[in-house]
Amino acid sequence: MSQYLLPCSCGANIPVSRSQAGMSLPCPQCAKSLDVPTIRNMASLASISDTPEKAKSSSAPIWLGPVAAIAFLAAVAASFYCGSLIWERYQILSTLAEQKMDLTITEEDYLSDRRKLASKSSPADTWDYWNVMARQGLSDANPPDLFRVKRYLESGMPLIWGSLATAVLSFAVFAVSALIMQRAKR
């Protein structure tokens, strides 16, 4: 319903509607009786917009809702993936700890120790090793499985950090878009 401002000589503006046309109203500030003009003459008064709040606020873009939903799903999926990678890493490390494997040794240290051991062996031990190799063939010279597991764990770190960054970024996009939508509703 349209409302108008009825001015008083004291400086107050009283909001009136068309339903009050032709009535007398007291001024809330000075208590003076004011005559509300007829409907025909009400157009000469200053108008109050019906929805000043709606005119001021802008609505959120229509694509913001789906963006927020996709960002939320991406944050949840990346969080679960990061959690599963961390859980797998924990399981492997706890298994290695139960087997009392030395996780501090590097491949370079291992190969260096093997070279030192070979250089200290006696000629008889070297001859015996030579005969074993001649009968059985060359053995696989790969280092122990511990180093393959350590390489696997090291190669998984970028995945953990990447999925964690994706989860944080996706959650930030979700939070910002939800905040924008919330402010647009006000």
Image (tube, grey):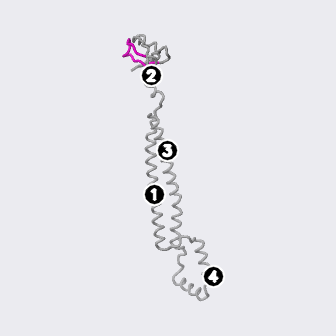
Camera-nearest label, 1 or 2: 2
- Amino acid found under the numbered disc labelled 4: Ser
Tell me which label, 1 or 3, sits earlier in the chain.
1
- Span of residues in magenta: 13-26
Say if the magenta span includes residue 183: no
SS of the residue under disc 4: helix
Q: Which residue is mark 2?
A: 49
The reply to whether dot 1 and dot 3 touch (C-beta < 8 Å) is no
- Amino acid found under the numbered disc labelled 3: Val
- Amino acid found under the numbered disc labelled 2: Ser
User: Left or right: 119 with respect to 62?
Assistant: right
Q: Is 169 in front, or is 6? A: 6
Q: Residue at x 50, y 68 (%)?
A: 149
Q: Which residue is mark 1?
A: 83
Tell me which label, 4 or 1, sits earlier in the chain.
1
Q: Which residue is mark 3?
A: 173
Determine crowd level at label 3: few under 14, some 14-19, many 20+ residues with C-alpha closer than 10 A.
some
Q: Which residue is mark 4?
A: 119
Task: Give how far apart the Cα atoms at labels 2 and 3 are.
Answer: 36 Å
